[in-house]
Image: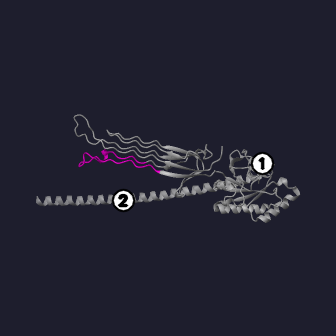
Amino acid sequence: MKFFDEARIEVVAGDGGNGVATFRREKYIPRGGPNGGDGGRGGSVYAVADRNINTLIDYRYTRHFRAERGENGGSRDCYGKGGEDITLRFPVGTVISDQESGEVIADLDEDGKRILLASGGRGGLGNIHFKSSTNRAPRKRTMGQEGEHRTLHLELKVLADVGLLGLPNAGKSTFIRAVSAAKPKVADYPFTTLAPNLGVVRTAENRSFVIADIPGLIEGAAEGAGLGHQFLRHLQRTHVLLHLVDLAPFDPEADPARDARAIVEELRKYDEGLYNKPRWLALNKLDLIPEEERAERVAAFLEAYGPVERHFEISALKGEGCKPLIFAIQDFLDAERERIEAERQARLAAEQARLAEIDGARAAAEARALEAALAADEDDAEDLDDEAHDDSDDTSSRN
């Protein structure tokens, strides 16, 4: 199946049904009064994230989706039937935005997440709603409201923990084959990868992470050169970027350090947030370098490249150095998940404290109002007692 990660669709919610103006007409009941019912509500359009869908191919050719219109009201107080809602299913990670304003409507980042895209129109009112003591035969009714109409832009950003960067033919697909069960195409020519590949790396029975491989980047990618720029969005949700560098390029005039810095610069031009993500280096294809030259080649590269957070020396083809790398990634991701969970718990505790404070203030206000009411009742009771004493004194004086 061809991979599609962008699409444009139109969604139209159903119009509401019209209310009617009718009157009861039966034998021996000459003035039965109004009995026109309301129109039904129009159907709405919803979006749901579905983990069983991988691409937006379903929205490549079918682009218009219209919900059912509500039925008109009827006589004898009959209300119109509401229109059927429609539910559109998208891959997890789809971002839905308004085509005209650019406003993000929904980010379907969890399986089963449900979002309203277009609301159906409300049904019109029948004349039974307009009768009164002064208007016993109303002929007024209202029309149903129109449903919302939106043009939406769909953008899929795959959910992965680790993103692979590098020039074409740097060994990214070979690496993902070596550490996971994914089997992307591997060949000895550039741009073998034409679409993102995902692989699950399992380091223990209950420890794993997802790694994403995108087509190789070249210099000028941020301006549209090559294929990789089309898929950089899929790295925006990752926690760490793994930059694979070919230390044994085919071209003897190639400069790995200069090429690696060029890729980093393309990241900065494309998205500052992506550029600021943690980024590790994986120096690949060491099996093509004689053992006595490896240390010198690595040292020369690091000196020319500049400061780096972490680097690893691997051979993806033979699997050398891959295990320490994936375990280091797993430890980093575990710590990152703990940090995110701690932040989430802190936000939840702060929200609960805020709600408790609001509830406490509301309870205190209610208590003050109750005390004031009781005090007022006591004052009224004292006034009644005073009046009763006055009445008794008047009676005794008269006697």
Q: In which quarter of the image is the N terminus?
A: top right
Residue 45 visible to an observer of this rendering: yes
Q: Position of residue 50 (x, y in %)?
A: 58, 44
| Most frequent secondary structure within the magenta stretch | loop
- Rendered position, 321 above or below 27: below
Q: Where is residue 272 in the image (x, y as percent from the top left)?
A: 64, 62
Q: Which residue lies furthest to the top in this view?
A: 27
In the rendering, which numbered label is found on residue 369? Answer: 2
Residue stretch rendered in magenta on the structure: 121-148
User: Few, some or many C-alpha atoms within 10 Å of disc 2 (few <14, some 14-19, many ≥20)?
Assistant: few
Side of 29 relative to 115 (left or right): left
Q: What residue do we see at 79% from left, 65% from top? A: 304
Q: Which of 175 and 367 is in front in this view?
A: 175
Q: Residue furthest left?
A: 399
Q: Nearer the viewer, residue 244 or 312?
A: 244
Q: How far apart are marks 2 and 1 (CA)?
A: 79 Å
In the rendering, which numbered label is found on residue 87? Answer: none
- Identify the amino acid type marked 2: Ala
- Identify the amino acid type marked 1: Ala
Q: Position of residue 346 (x, y in %)?
A: 57, 57
Q: What residue do we see at 17% from left, 59% from top? A: 391
